Image (spheres, coloured by chain):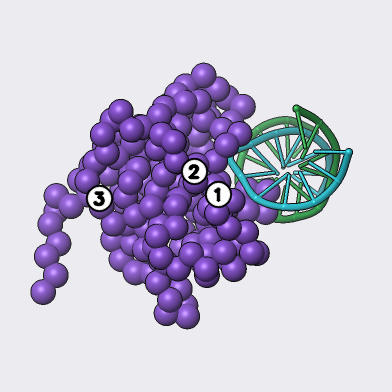
Chain colours: A purple, B cyan, C green
Amino acid sequence: MVLTSPAHFGWLRLRSEAAARRLLGCELERRLDTGELLRARIVETEAYDEDDEASHTYRGRTERNAAMFGPAGRLYVYRMRGHHCCNVVTGEAGYGQGALLRAVEPLAGEATMSLLRGGRAGADLASGPGKLCQALAITHGLYGHDLASAPLRLIERPPLDPAAIVASPRIGVSRAVTAHRRFHLRDNVHVSRR
DNA sequence: CCAGTGATGTCCT
DNA sequence: GGACATCACTGGT
Protein backbone atom coordinates (compact mmCIF):
# COMPACT_ATOMS: atom_id res chain seq x y z
CA MET A 1 0.00 0.00 0.00
CA VAL A 2 1.51 3.25 -1.13
CA LEU A 3 0.92 6.29 1.01
CA THR A 4 0.50 9.44 -1.06
CA SER A 5 0.25 12.49 1.10
CA PRO A 6 -1.22 15.66 -0.39
CA ALA A 7 1.47 17.51 1.52
CA HIS A 8 4.17 15.64 -0.35
CA PHE A 9 6.11 18.09 -2.53
CA GLY A 10 3.86 20.89 -1.35
CA TRP A 11 6.90 23.14 -1.54
CA LEU A 12 6.85 22.80 -5.32
CA ARG A 13 3.89 25.15 -5.22
CA LEU A 14 6.16 27.84 -3.85
CA ARG A 15 7.37 30.58 -6.18
CA SER A 16 10.05 29.42 -8.59
CA GLU A 17 12.88 31.00 -6.64
CA ALA A 18 12.10 29.19 -3.38
CA ALA A 19 11.32 25.96 -5.21
CA ALA A 20 14.56 26.19 -7.21
CA ARG A 21 16.50 26.41 -3.94
CA ARG A 22 14.52 23.58 -2.38
CA LEU A 23 15.14 21.30 -5.38
CA LEU A 24 18.88 21.30 -4.68
CA GLY A 25 19.88 18.01 -3.07
CA CYS A 26 16.73 16.25 -4.27
CA GLU A 27 17.13 13.34 -6.67
CA LEU A 28 15.89 12.21 -10.06
CA GLU A 29 15.20 8.54 -10.70
CA ARG A 30 15.03 7.61 -14.37
CA ARG A 31 13.83 4.21 -15.62
CA LEU A 32 15.16 3.61 -19.12
CA ASP A 33 13.32 1.59 -21.76
CA THR A 34 15.92 -1.11 -21.15
CA GLY A 35 14.73 -1.38 -17.55
CA GLU A 36 17.89 0.10 -16.12
CA LEU A 37 17.52 2.58 -13.29
CA LEU A 38 19.52 5.81 -13.25
CA ARG A 39 19.68 8.13 -10.27
CA ALA A 40 21.19 11.59 -9.90
CA ARG A 41 21.29 14.43 -7.38
CA ILE A 42 20.23 17.93 -8.44
CA VAL A 43 23.12 20.33 -7.79
CA GLU A 44 22.23 23.40 -9.87
CA THR A 45 18.95 25.14 -10.78
CA GLU A 46 17.64 28.46 -12.09
CA ALA A 47 14.33 30.21 -11.38
CA TYR A 48 12.07 31.60 -14.13
CA ASP A 49 8.59 33.09 -14.03
CA GLU A 50 6.09 35.21 -15.85
CA ASP A 51 7.29 38.56 -14.51
CA ASP A 52 10.81 37.72 -15.59
CA GLU A 53 12.10 39.09 -18.90
CA ALA A 54 14.38 36.11 -19.38
CA SER A 55 11.59 33.57 -18.99
CA HIS A 56 9.92 31.67 -21.81
CA THR A 57 6.61 32.60 -20.16
CA TYR A 58 7.28 36.35 -20.09
CA ARG A 59 5.18 36.99 -23.21
CA GLY A 60 2.36 34.73 -22.12
CA ARG A 61 1.22 31.24 -22.85
CA THR A 62 2.02 29.53 -26.14
CA GLU A 63 1.79 25.95 -27.33
CA ARG A 64 5.49 25.51 -26.55
CA ASN A 65 5.48 26.74 -22.95
CA ALA A 66 2.00 25.51 -21.96
CA ALA A 67 3.37 23.03 -19.42
CA MET A 68 4.81 25.85 -17.32
CA PHE A 69 1.28 27.19 -16.82
CA GLY A 70 0.09 23.81 -15.56
CA PRO A 71 0.31 22.19 -12.12
CA ALA A 72 3.58 22.04 -10.20
CA GLY A 73 5.66 18.89 -10.33
CA ARG A 74 5.43 18.35 -14.04
CA LEU A 75 8.21 18.59 -16.57
CA TYR A 76 8.59 21.35 -19.15
CA VAL A 77 10.92 20.17 -21.93
CA TYR A 78 12.13 22.44 -24.71
CA ARG A 79 14.71 22.28 -27.47
CA MET A 80 17.51 24.73 -27.72
CA ARG A 81 20.07 24.78 -30.53
CA GLY A 82 19.62 21.08 -31.06
CA HIS A 83 19.68 20.19 -27.35
CA HIS A 84 16.94 19.33 -24.87
CA CYS A 85 16.57 21.28 -21.62
CA CYS A 86 13.98 20.82 -18.87
CA ASN A 87 12.26 22.67 -16.05
CA VAL A 88 10.36 21.39 -13.05
CA VAL A 89 7.10 23.33 -13.11
CA THR A 90 6.53 25.21 -9.84
CA GLY A 91 3.89 27.43 -8.26
CA GLU A 92 0.14 27.50 -8.74
CA ALA A 93 -1.35 26.49 -12.09
CA GLY A 94 -2.21 29.45 -14.29
CA TYR A 95 0.97 31.38 -13.59
CA GLY A 96 3.84 30.32 -15.86
CA GLN A 97 6.92 29.48 -13.84
CA GLY A 98 9.47 26.77 -13.19
CA ALA A 99 12.97 25.79 -12.16
CA LEU A 100 15.47 24.96 -14.89
CA LEU A 101 17.55 21.91 -14.00
CA ARG A 102 21.10 22.97 -14.85
CA ALA A 103 23.28 20.21 -13.43
CA VAL A 104 23.09 16.85 -11.68
CA GLU A 105 25.58 14.55 -10.01
CA PRO A 106 25.39 10.81 -10.81
CA LEU A 107 24.41 8.44 -8.01
CA ALA A 108 23.54 5.25 -9.91
CA GLY A 109 23.99 4.08 -13.49
CA GLU A 110 26.89 6.41 -14.10
CA ALA A 111 28.41 4.16 -16.79
CA THR A 112 25.18 4.25 -18.81
CA MET A 113 24.89 7.99 -18.38
CA SER A 114 28.41 8.28 -19.75
CA LEU A 115 27.42 6.19 -22.77
CA LEU A 116 24.39 8.40 -23.34
CA ARG A 117 26.80 11.34 -23.22
CA GLY A 118 29.02 9.91 -25.92
CA GLY A 119 31.71 8.75 -23.53
CA ARG A 120 32.04 11.91 -21.49
CA ALA A 121 32.41 11.51 -17.76
CA GLY A 122 33.20 13.14 -14.45
CA ALA A 123 32.69 16.88 -14.28
CA ASP A 124 31.60 16.88 -17.93
CA LEU A 125 28.89 14.25 -17.48
CA ALA A 126 25.87 16.37 -16.62
CA SER A 127 27.18 19.86 -15.86
CA GLY A 128 24.72 21.75 -18.04
CA PRO A 129 20.99 21.70 -18.89
CA GLY A 130 21.53 19.98 -22.24
CA LYS A 131 24.08 17.58 -20.84
CA LEU A 132 21.86 16.37 -18.02
CA CYS A 133 18.97 15.75 -20.40
CA GLN A 134 21.29 13.66 -22.55
CA ALA A 135 22.66 11.76 -19.53
CA LEU A 136 19.15 10.96 -18.29
CA ALA A 137 17.60 10.41 -21.75
CA ILE A 138 15.13 13.26 -21.29
CA THR A 139 13.50 14.25 -24.58
CA HIS A 140 10.27 15.81 -25.78
CA GLY A 141 8.53 12.50 -25.08
CA LEU A 142 8.57 13.49 -21.40
CA TYR A 143 6.95 16.87 -22.07
CA GLY A 144 4.38 17.48 -19.31
CA HIS A 145 5.34 14.29 -17.49
CA ASP A 146 4.25 14.08 -13.84
CA LEU A 147 7.42 13.70 -11.78
CA ALA A 148 5.57 11.73 -9.11
CA SER A 149 5.51 8.75 -11.49
CA ALA A 150 7.69 6.48 -13.62
CA PRO A 151 9.71 6.62 -15.76
CA LEU A 152 11.09 9.82 -14.26
CA ARG A 153 10.51 10.45 -10.58
CA LEU A 154 11.56 13.31 -8.35
CA ILE A 155 12.71 12.08 -4.95
CA GLU A 156 12.51 14.50 -2.07
CA ARG A 157 15.48 14.92 0.25
CA PRO A 158 15.83 17.01 3.40
CA PRO A 159 16.34 20.75 2.77
CA LEU A 160 19.96 21.83 2.63
CA ASP A 161 21.63 24.28 4.96
CA PRO A 162 21.05 27.66 3.23
CA ALA A 163 24.73 28.39 3.80
CA ALA A 164 25.58 25.53 1.42
CA ILE A 165 23.73 27.24 -1.45
CA VAL A 166 25.30 29.86 -3.69
CA ALA A 167 23.08 32.37 -5.56
CA SER A 168 24.45 34.07 -8.69
CA PRO A 169 23.31 35.51 -12.05
CA ARG A 170 21.83 33.03 -14.49
CA ILE A 171 23.93 31.64 -17.30
CA GLY A 172 23.31 32.25 -20.99
CA VAL A 173 20.51 34.79 -20.64
CA SER A 174 20.61 38.20 -22.32
CA ARG A 175 17.83 39.82 -20.28
CA ALA A 176 17.49 40.32 -16.53
CA VAL A 177 21.19 39.59 -16.36
CA THR A 178 21.73 40.99 -12.87
CA ALA A 179 19.10 38.92 -11.07
CA HIS A 180 20.67 36.30 -8.82
CA ARG A 181 18.34 33.46 -9.72
CA ARG A 182 20.87 30.70 -10.31
CA PHE A 183 21.42 28.38 -7.37
CA HIS A 184 24.01 25.67 -6.85
CA LEU A 185 25.74 23.67 -4.18
CA ARG A 186 28.86 25.37 -2.90
CA ASP A 187 32.09 23.66 -3.97
CA ASN A 188 30.33 21.01 -6.03
CA VAL A 189 32.39 19.59 -8.90
CA HIS A 190 29.36 18.83 -11.06
CA VAL A 191 27.92 22.33 -11.47
CA SER A 192 28.32 24.08 -14.80
CA ARG A 193 31.08 26.66 -15.02
CA ARG A 194 30.77 29.57 -17.36
C1' DC B 1 7.07 32.89 -45.73
C1' DC B 2 11.38 34.15 -43.87
C1' DA B 3 15.05 36.01 -41.06
C1' DG B 4 16.63 36.41 -36.45
C1' DT B 5 17.40 34.39 -32.22
C1' DG B 6 18.44 31.78 -28.27
C1' DA B 7 17.68 29.21 -20.50
C1' DT B 8 23.76 25.10 -25.38
C1' DG B 9 27.66 22.08 -26.31
C1' DT B 10 31.90 21.12 -28.49
C1' DC B 11 36.04 21.87 -30.63
C1' DC B 12 39.92 24.82 -31.48
C1' DT B 13 43.77 27.98 -30.29
C1' DG C 1 38.40 32.96 -24.65
C1' DG C 2 36.19 32.44 -29.21
C1' DA C 3 33.92 30.19 -33.38
C1' DC C 4 30.23 27.46 -35.05
C1' DA C 5 27.02 23.62 -35.52
C1' DT C 6 22.16 23.43 -35.35
C1' DC C 7 16.91 23.95 -35.13
C1' DA C 8 12.44 25.03 -33.08
C1' DC C 9 10.09 29.02 -32.09
C1' DT C 10 8.85 33.83 -32.68
C1' DG C 11 7.65 38.08 -34.72
C1' DG C 12 7.47 40.70 -38.66
C1' DT C 13 6.38 40.80 -43.76
Q: Residue at x 14, y 53 (%)?
A: A6
Residue A157 is labelled as: 3
As drawn, which residue projects farthest toward the bottom? Answer: A34
**What's the residue type where badge 1 is placed?**
Ala
- For marks 2 and 3, the one nearer the N-term is 3
Q: Residue type at mark 3?
A: Arg
Residue A194 picture location, percent across and down: 61, 34
Mark 2 residue element: loop
- The disc label shown at residue A123, or none: 1
Quick one: label 2, few (<14), some, or many (20+) residues within 10 Å? some
Horizontally, residue B8 falls left or right of residue A136, namely right
Quarter of the view holding residue A116: bottom right
- Between marks 1 and 3, how big is the CA–CA gap? 23 Å
Q: Is residue A96 above or below residue A76?
A: above
Decide if residue A179 is in sight here.
Answer: yes
Disc 2 vs disc 3: which is toward the camera?
Answer: 2
Quadrant of residue A39 in the image? Answer: bottom left
**Residue A94 image position (x, y, % from top left):** 33, 41
Identify which residue is drawn at 67% across, 54% down. Answer: A82
If you read the primary sequence from the N terminus, does the residue marked by circle 1 or circle 3 appear first? Answer: 1
Q: Secondary structure at mark 1?
A: helix
Q: Chain of mark 1?
A: A
Q: Residue at x 65, y 64 (%)?
A: A118
How far is mark 1 from mark 2, CA to CA? 6 Å
Left or right for A82, reference B13: left
Up/down of A23 relative to A55, above or below: below
Chain under label 3?
A: A
Question: Is disc 2 in the same subunit as disc 3?
Answer: yes
Q: Nearer the viewer, residue A178 or C10?
A: A178
Task: Name the residue that disc number 2 marks.
Answer: A189
The chain under label 2 reads A
